Amino acid sequence: MCPNAAVQGVADGATSNWAWLIPRADVQALYFYHLSTYISKVSDILFAKNSSDREEWTETWLNKIKCSNNGADLLIDGLEERREALKKPSAEELDKVLVRLNNQKERTHYRRERTNNRPIGSGVIEAACKKNAHQTTHVLLRNEADQRWGLKYYSNLISYPFK
């Protein structure tokens, strides 16, 4: 372990995640996939009847946010301008997304994170955990008959408090 290494926290928008991560992580990032769900929701509101415009708009903004220094601010400003032209139900849906974006915008500096080789998602970690759990389960269940392994051992292993 490197005692001076920065600790990166990546999570979705749940308040409880950040309450736990903020005191433990030097740098926090909103999980990019989670941000993409916000943007997808907005594109559904803005382009309900035109799927090609919806897809193009979504891709454009995902790239802007990932590659620019102030993409989230630009998106928020643009959405606030477009909000006035929306009917009430759509405007209310957009307001919900704007609240989430405003709450998380300080955690959307993806260009900085990528420049510093920090993660903006947890896909690699989740895949590694899934593969490890699958392989461990396969070995343990296969060897259950010899009583050296088995479900009792496995349940102790997966409840181990890793730090």
Image (spheres, rainbow, N blue to C red):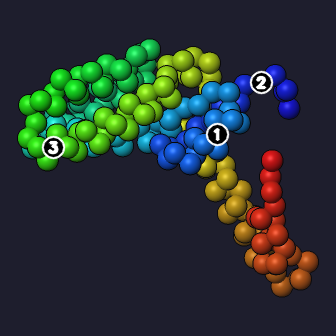
Residue to which mark 2 is pinned: 5
For the image, the number of numbered tags is: 3
Residue to which mark 1 is pinned: 21
Q: At 54% from the left edge and 32% from the top edge, which residue is drawn?
A: 29
Measured as percent of width and height from the top left, residue 1 is found at 86, 32
Q: Earlier in the sequence, mark 2 or mark 3?
A: 2
Q: Is residue 153 visible?
A: yes
Measured as percent of width and height from the top left, residue 24 is found at 71, 36
Q: CA distance from mark 2 to mark 3?
A: 45 Å
* Numbered disc in front, either 1 or 2: 1
The three-letter code of the residue at mark 2 reads Ala
Q: Is residue 36 visible?
A: no
Q: At 18% from the left edge and 23% from the top edge, which residue is drawn?
A: 81
The three-letter code of the residue at mark 3 reads Ser
Given residues 13 and 40, the one toward you in this image is: 13
Q: Secondary structure at mark 2?
A: loop
Measured as percent of width and height from the top left, residue 96 is found at 29, 42
Q: Earlier in the sequence, mark 3 or mark 1?
A: 1
Quadrant in which residue 149 is drawn: bottom right
Badge 2 vs badge 3, beta-carbon distance below 8 Å: no
Up the image or down, 116 lies above or below 152; here it is: above
Q: Going by the image, does 126 lie left or right of 80?
A: right
The three-letter code of the residue at mark 1 reads Leu
Quadrant in which residue 132 is drawn: bottom right
